Image (cartoon, rainbow, N blue to C red):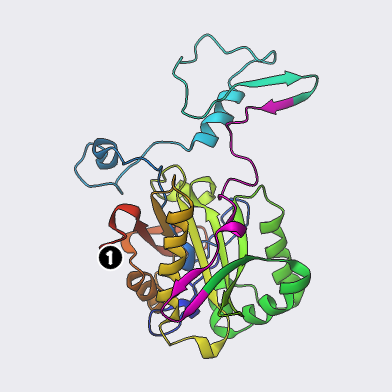
């Protein structure tokens, strides 16, 4: 994923980007603009969050996403679908029952589908902001690619997203998002009817990013690039990041936090996240950058 987007800053526009190869449905960059911690809808267990060491929720949280537990459960069944005798009997919260018919595998309907991994971003609706009405509109290649490619070729964005060059460079990246199973949704940000930013909303707990921090089920990540140079340096980054993080928390009741991982060098981007009510959680080493792990918590959203 791209590193923090220089165009998403709080007062100095910084493209909010995420610069880590986030496999979660995108080879999306873990570049700072888009990191969100979303947890399960339930209140976190204090003991689990402290890891028993008193260092708080970010020290160690070893709970695996329900979807991953489901896959593990299937792997440990034998070729006839029978559970191995040495397996524990505890059942994960998501049903892992699977029946094999012929050579196909039908997964229990309780497991997430492509449409509900992110609770249908296309249906989230508008967000009222101090600068106008904002919409997230899922990307359509034929309509949006030229605009996104032009934004990616701006030097400030290219430094972190690393998608400059011919249009097919951006196209390959966006198509990789669209070709996934719905765990990453690329969007155009439309402010008062004008397309002005590129976003990636993704399941951080199902992304390679989850290997680098104590992920919790339904953590949701954000990557942001403010496109037009004229829109940068006006504080739009912080306002829009807050609006989108609030949208995530409102539309995804199972998500307890929104995550972002800007490049640690991208000071304006980090400032935008802080302005948007995110807190600095830790520094993490990602495959292509050292990032500042930022989180906006559901429980703190009315205070920050």
> Is residue 117 one of those drawn in magenta?
yes
Q: Measured from the top left, where is residue 248 in percent x and y? A: 47, 57
| Residue 2 placement: quadrant | bottom right
Q: Which residues are magenta?
A: 105-133
Q: 127 or 82, which lies in front? A: 127
Numbered circles on residues, count: 1
Q: Measured from the top left, where is residue 280 in percent x and y? A: 31, 63
Which quadrant does the C terminus fall into? bottom left
| Residue 235 placement: quadrant | bottom left
Q: Residue at x 68, y 64 (%)?
A: 174
- Residue 3 in view here: no
| Residue 156 placement: quadrant | bottom right
Q: Is residue 302 left or right of residue 248?
A: left
Q: Is residue 144 left or right of residue 44?
A: right
Q: Main secondary structure of the magenta part?
A: loop
Q: Secondary structure at mark 1?
A: loop
Question: Residue at the bottom extreme?
Answer: 230
Q: Which residue is mark 1?
A: 304
Q: Measured from the top left, where is residue 205 in percent x and y? A: 48, 46
Q: Residues within 10 Å of mark 1 (few under 14, many from 20)?
A: some
Q: Residue at x 48, y 57 (%)?
A: 221
Question: Residue at the left extreme?
Answer: 54
Which quadrant does the N terminus fall into? bottom right
């Amino acid at each position: 994923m791209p590193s923090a987007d220089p165009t998403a800053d709080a007062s100095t526009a910084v493209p909010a980007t995420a610069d880590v190869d986030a496999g979660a449905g995108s080879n999306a960059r873990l570049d700072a603009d888009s990191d969100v911690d979303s947890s399960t809808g339930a209140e976190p267990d204090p003991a689990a969050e402290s890891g028993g060491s008193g260092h708080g929720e970010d020290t160690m949280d070893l709970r695996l996403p329900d979807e991953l537990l489901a896959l593990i459960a299937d792997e440990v069944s034998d070729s006839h679908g029978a559970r191995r005798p040495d397996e524990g009997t505890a059942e994960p919260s998501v049903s892992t029952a699977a029946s094999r018919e012929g050579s196909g595998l039908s997964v229990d309907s309780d497991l997430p589908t492509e449409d509900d991994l992110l609770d249908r971003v296309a249906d989230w609706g508008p967000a009222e902001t101090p600068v106008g009405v904002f919409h997230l509109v899922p990307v359509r290649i034929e309509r949006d690619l030229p605009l996104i490619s032009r934004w990616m070729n701006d030097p400030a964005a290219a430094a972190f997203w690393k998608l400059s060059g011919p249009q097919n460079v951006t196209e390959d990246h966006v198509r990789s998002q669209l070709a996934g199973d719905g765990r990453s949704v690329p969007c155009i940000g439309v402010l008062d009817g004008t397309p002005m930013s590129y976003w990636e909303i993704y399941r951080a707990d199902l992304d390679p990013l989850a290997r680098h921090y104590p992920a919790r089920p339904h953590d949701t990540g954000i990557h942001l690039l403010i496109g037009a140079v004229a829109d940068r340096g006006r504080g739009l980054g912080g306002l829009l990041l807050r609006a989108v993080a609030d949208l995530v928390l409102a539309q995804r009741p199972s998500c307890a936090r929104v995550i972002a991982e800007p490049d640690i060098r991208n000071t304006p981007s980090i400032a935008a996240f802080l302005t948007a009510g995110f807190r600095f959680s830790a520094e993490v080493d990602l495959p292509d950058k050292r990032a500042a792990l930022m989180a906006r918590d559901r429980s703190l959203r009315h205070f920050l």
